[in-house]
Amino acid sequence: MFYTTDTNAHGMPHDPFKAIVAPRPIGWIGSRSRAGKDNLAPYSFFNAVSSLPPVVMFSSDTIKDSYTNIEETGVFTASLASLNLAGKMNLTSAPLARGESEFVAAGLTAINGRLVDAPYVGEAYAALECRVTGLMPAPTLEGYTSESRLVFGQVVGIHIREEAIGEDGLLDMTKIRPVGRMGYLDYAECGAPFQMKRPRRD
Ligand SMILES: Cc1cc2nc3c(=O)[nH]c(=O)nc-3n(C[C@H](O)[C@H](O)[C@H](O)COP(=O)(O)O)c2cc1C
């Protein structure tokens, strides 16, 4: 089948777009309002978009509390959403009133960043501290007119729990088991990783 997205006439019970771009990493975004109120929410339109320097990006479908806080303060954190925290991660997507802490609602520990004034998830195996490098509406064929907002942040500090590091000194992904978001209500769980050597020219 083929369909165009101007009409979105896919004829399926649910829009398949998010199920096609899957699995997506989940940025568990920690932020703090100018008034000092902590906020936490998962964003699966999230990824690392550069490694030198390390830059991450997430997108908010509309202007939500995370975006508002980050616009006020210029900083945020992104904690790693792992299988053991998946239920709590989901709880933090509840639409609480601005100023109400999802850390408290989900029973998670808010730890303040070392370099940025924003909280991250103390229970997470890893967390990134980020300084905003760009805030913009999503660029679309109509220009910058959509409600969707992109947030770019340069990673300035990284927390890793010692227990997440294996005997070989690498992150133990078998232990961490990051979860990915797919379409509908689906999530992907990472089992044991497999390795492939990159092809060489010769
Ligand atoms: C796994 C998961 C991924 C999500 N990804 C996004 C996303 O990429 N963009 C978005 O706008 N909302 C996303 N949401 C919904 C937000 O988490 C939800 O609207 C939340 O209440 C926003 O919180 P805030 O207003 O505190 O920022 C996601 C929810 C879940 C459970």
Image (cartoon, grey):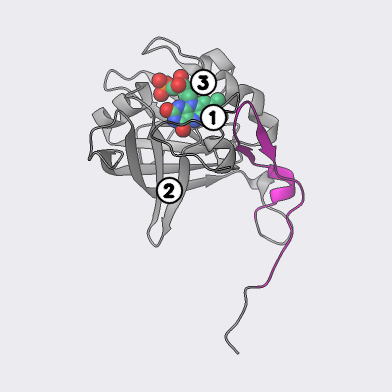
Q: Is mark 3 within 8 Å of ligand 1?
A: yes
Mark positioned earlier in the residue sequence (3 or 1): 1
User: Is residue 161 shown left or right of residue 103?
Assistant: right
List the single residue furthest toward the top. Answer: 97
Residue for point 60% across, 82% down = 200
Please provide percent x and percent y for residue 103: 51, 20
Between the residue at mark 3 and the residue at mark 1, the CA separation in whole angstroms equals 21 Å
Tag in front: 2 or 1: 1
Q: Residues within 10 Å of mark 2 (few under 14, many from 20)?
A: some
Principal SS element in the magenta part? loop
| As drawn, 124 above or below 95 | below
User: In which quadrant is the N terminus drawn?
Assistant: top right
Image side of residue 46 versus residue 21, left or right = left
* Residue type beneath disc 3: Ser
* Residue at the spot of label 2: 157
Type of the residue with mark 1: Asp
- First reached walking from the N terminus: tag 3 or tag 2: 3
Q: Are marks 3 and 2 in contact (CB under 8 Å)?
A: no
Circle 1 crowding by C-alpha within 10 Å: few under 14, some 14–19, many from 20: some
Q: Which structural element holds mark 2?
A: strand
Q: Quadrant of residue 33?
A: top left
**Mark 1 = which residue?**
15
Q: Is residue 80 above or below residue 100?
A: below
Q: Residue at x 38, y 49 (%)?
A: 156
Q: Is residue 29 visible in the rendered structure shown here?
A: no
Q: Which residue is mark 3?
A: 93
Magenta-colored span? 171-197
Say whether residue 188 is magenta: yes
Q: Nearer the viewer, mark 3 or mark 2?
A: 3
Residue 112 coordinates in the image, percent (x, y) = 43, 31
